[in-house]
Amino acid sequence: MAGGRAIGRDVHFYNFADPDKALGGLILNPSVTEKTFLYMLGNLIIASGPYRVTLRSTGHDLTPTDEPLQPGHYDIRPYSRKGTISITDEPWIMRIISQSSTGRENTFRTEVRKRDGKCVITGTINRRANRDNWTGFHAAHIFPLSSEDYWVQNGFSRWITNKGERDTGINSCQNGLLMKPTIHELFDGFYFSINPDDGYKIICFDEDNEGIDGRILDRVCRDPNSDRSARDELLRWHFRHAVLANMRGAGEPSFETDFPPGSDIMGEILSGPAAAKRMEAELSSRLCDYFSPGTVQSL
């Protein structure tokens, strides 16, 4: 079973009025500056007015600068004596690793490969592309394919400019990035994300085994003059949900994905964390190509 997201945190933050109960925390990586941390908290904190964030051990108030964030305990205090601080209860969208295998997903995969030609996180170029050999490269959805109903219900297609008349747009290359398989797995697990509001900087929320923390998303997938580029709105959505998954409370469940041949995959899922939600996501992922919202399928 995969480990919990709170293990190994070296940054913790609190409501100043309850200094013994952490609201959440973070595994600190070098890319996280004071400005980055304040931006992250802005995705989590619901406040009645302005507030300050103070490192408890030194009394230092954070400012939106590029100074590296220091490990420690941070108190969030409203400027007003009557001010209140709480954490958002916005639902987190669970996702599983998305694979492009049939129907409309094949078009998605082809278009993402054609646009990127490399892992846009590590910069690794596919030197076999001229032979149409894409072994070791995955076309990853930014917003998960398994949550297409949520995509439709909340009007996410408004951000897609190159979809067909009857298409939801979730399989547009504007919702995709080409990645190495391990990077894809980490992206789908929200273990790292890309902040389009900070120069497309890559932020790791776990130990950075792959050496990607602080890198910049490759320009090949974000040309502002191209209607095929990944959309900032979707990158921003992914970053927000990475913050929710990793920093709120004890964090959201993380899942095992390495099932050896002969494993009881169903049993593993049902005995793991958030079993019902994960099973729903797994089933939705497998059925979405056959029961696409807004289309009628022949069976």
Image (cartoon, rainbow, N blue to C red):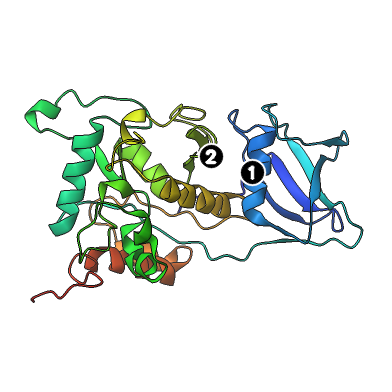
**Which quadrant of the structure image shows residue 102?**
bottom left
Which residue does the numbered mark 2 point to in the structure image? 197
Which residue does the numbered mark 1 point to in the structure image? 39
Badge 1: few (under 14), some or many (20 or more) residues near its Cα, within 10 Å? some
Q: Residue at x 70, y 32 (%)?
A: 69
The answer to whether one can see residue 192 in this image is yes
Badge 1 marks a residue whose secondary structure is helix
Whether 19 is drawn above or below 84: the answer is above
Say which quadrant the N terminus sits in. bottom left
**Residue 164 location (% of width, % of height):** 20, 59
Left/right placement of residue 185 relative to residue 34 reads left
Q: 8 or 296: which is nearer to us?
A: 296
Q: Are marks 1 and 2 in contact (CB under 8 Å)?
A: yes
Say which quadrant the C terminus sits in. bottom left
Badge 2 marks a residue whose secondary structure is loop
Q: Residue at x 20, y 46 (%)?
A: 109
Whether 90 is drawn above or below 32: the answer is below
Q: Which residue is drawn at 53% across and 51% down?
A: 240
Give, as a three-letter code, the residue at label 2: Asp
**Residue 24 location (% of width, % of height):** 68, 52
Give, as a three-letter code, the residue at label 1: Tyr
**Which quadrant of the structure image shows residue 58?**
top right
Of the numbered discs 1 and 2, the one sitting upstream in the chain is 1
User: Distance of mark 1 from mark 2, alpha carbons?
Assistant: 9 Å
The answer to whether one can see residue 4 in this image is no
The tag on residue 240 is none
